[in-house]
Amino acid sequence: MQLIYQKQEQKTRITYGEILTNSIKPAAYANKHLVIFTNQRYYDRFFDKLARVFKGATIDWYVCSNLVYGNTVSELMDALHFLKRFSANEAYLFVAFGNEGVVQLTGFLSQITPLKNTYWVLPISLRAYMQALVKESTICDGPLDTLMTTQALPEQIFLDQTIAQKQLDGKLVDLQMFIRTGLVCDHGFLQNLYSNFPSQKELESTAFSALVEPVTRFYQKDAEKIVAFGRVFEAAFYLTEKGHLLSESMKRFLGLLFHLIWNLPSLKEAFHIENFMHWLGQLGFPIFLPEQISVAEYLQNVLKLQAKENGLVVLQKIGTMGEKQFATEQNLLPALETYQKICTKI
């Protein structure tokens, strides 16, 4: 199956529902020197598979760390040093085959390198796929601390869901991205997630194939707003002492949850947050904040970081965005109390 994803003048052809060996034809990369950017874990696991997919091609690999936010200045400088040895007289195909950081790094490199190149993404997860739909590629000085940005959409995305589905430990993180999309873009989409994935059993046994088309449509319209919801609350954990007790995925999830709870008083329609959190707990999401993390310090970091975003995106109702607002100590503390009260009931 194919989709065309368009942001202003840029178009991306998306192929999904097929394995890579069937969807990628030799003519598409003929006469191109391939440079595949990946994480160490995926290099170890899929080196042979991609060699078969791109049979006969000249392939070089650039291997990044496994960090989600690996699109750092130091990684950029290392990658540029790596690319210096390649001839400017060849045509290159830059392929991102990795996590979100790899997608951002590859997109950024595709725009700033003097090497003539075409940029593709082969996502290893649905969250990497959604990152590929975000037009802005960034380089960070630490997680979510953006230093440089450029506009870069891949020419093609090939989503082999047999690869994505093998990352069983990541299905919960992928679902989190769908939940974020539903909260920001469509209440009905969120309700369908609630119906289709009532527990861990359904999550483990059900493929996300049917969600690819609607989430692509949502990202085409509102990618920047989707990405922004929860970002400040997530980033605050990186600045908070003992924040390292939370994994990158847990920081992202709790950031989304705290942003939603803070947003509740601004909603024009009731939202059953207690039922919502109970569902998240049944699915296995880490809804409890470790006691070692200072909540007071965390909230101060939220207040400090929101200035960089010129406020926080706000839902007018579930699925509908309103105007940005600034959080205050007066409305953050009640949000924390709401969270703690619900946690005692779960």
Image: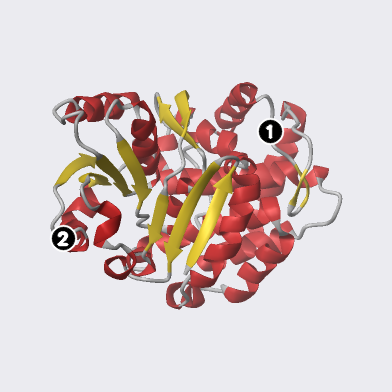
Position in image of residue 258 (x %, y %): 63, 44
Quadrant of the image occupied by residue 331: top right
SS at mark 2 in the image:
loop
27 or 126, which lies in front? 27
Identify the residue at the far right of this view.
268
- Which residue is drawn at the image coordinates 59% and 46% (left, top)? 256
Left-right relation of 315 to 295 = right
- Which residue is drawn at the image coordinates 44% and 48% (left, top)? 249
346 or 325, which lies in front? 325
Q: Is residue 76 above or below residue 265?
A: above
Q: Which mark is residue 55?
A: 2
Q: Which mark is residue 160?
A: none
- Which residue is drawn at the image coordinates 30% and 65% (left, top)? 20
- Which residue is drawn at the image coordinates 43% and 63% (left, top)? 15
SS at mark 1 in the image:
loop
Q: Is residue 291 above or below residue 182?
A: above
Name the N-terminal-most of marks 1 and 2: 2
Quadrant of the image occupied by residue 213: bottom right
CA gap between label 1 and label 2 equals: 48 Å
Q: Quadrant of the C terminus?
A: bottom right
Name the residue tied to disc 1. 312
Mark in the foreground, 1 or 2 = 2
Crowding at dot 1, Cα within 10 Å, few <14 / some 14-19 / many 20+, comes out as: many
Q: Is residue 183 above or below residue 294?
A: below
Q: Is residue 346 visible?
A: no
Position in image of residue 84 (x %, y %): 18, 25
Q: Amino acid at mark 2?
A: Lys
